[in-house]
Every structure is written in structure tokens, then in C-alpha cells.
Image (cartoon, helix red, strand yellow):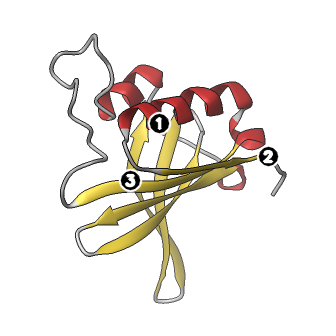
Amino acid sequence: MAITWQWADKVGEAEIYNRDKVVTYNLYKGNAFLIFLYEYEEDGKEMYSMHSFFVDERHAKRMLGIDKQDKSTYGDNCFATSNYRLQKIRLNAKKYGLADTKKLLGMFAQAFDNIAIEFYSEEE
């Protein structure tokens, strides 16, 4: 399955500490539960690279190390290592969907001891 999204459907941002700097990724929903894209400009052209994605809720839980049913990933948070850490997430609940916002933010709250979480509801 190819991951797809609409550029107009940005639902938020995530700040990730990566070794020696903080990088901001734009968040989209598309045909996946959450898509992390790094958007930048190079030689006057708009560019992007896909950083990560959660196919569905179960995949998100496995990536965050909180899926107790999966013994191979439980306790291993891909977004919290010594050189790489999700430190802030900002999510537009209206565009992402209130039910999914509650699920996702609950997962992040469970997976991290220290994270800034901001959610809002507005049309952009």
C-alpha cells in the first residue's frame, strides 16, 4: 500500500530532537493514522521527505513501545532514544478528528515521561 495524503490536509507539527538539533516535521493523516514529513526548500524548489508514519493505531502503539500484545516491541519507543526524541507535538483536533486526536495524544502521554502536547481546533 502506498502512503498518500493531500497537501491541504496538514494536521499539525512535531518537533524531534535529532542528535544535535531540533527538526520540525509536518503531520498529515491521509490513508495512514499519522504521517511525518520533513518539508524544505532546495535550490528554489519545494522538497519533502517522509520521515515516519503510523499505518494504524496498532502500528502507532508498536512504534511507541506501548503495545503489550507485541512482546518484540513492548517497551522500545522508536521516538525516545538517547540521540533521537520526540519532544513536542501540536495537533489540530478539528482537521485530524477529535476521536483520533484523543487516541493519539493518549498514546503519546503513555509513551513519554516528558513531552509537550498541544492540541487546538481551528480551520487553517
> Which amino acid type corresponds to the residue marked 2 in the rendered image?
Ser
Residue for badge 1? 109
Q: Residue furthest bottom?
A: 43
Q: CA distance from mark 2 to mark 3?
A: 22 Å
Crowd around label 3: few <14 · some 14–19 · many ≥20 (10 Å)? many
> Which circle marks residue 121 in the picture?
2
Q: Residue furthest left?
A: 72
**Residue found at x 18% / y 56%:** 82
Check the image and name the residue furthest to the right: 123
Quarter assignment of residue 29: top right
Question: SS class of the residue under badge 1?
Answer: helix
**Is residue 89 placed above or below 71 in the rendered structure?**
below
The residue pinned by badge 3 equals 86
* Image quarter hosting the N terminus: top left
Question: The disc labelled 1 sits on which kind of residue?
Answer: Ala
Front-lying residue, 40 or 27? 27
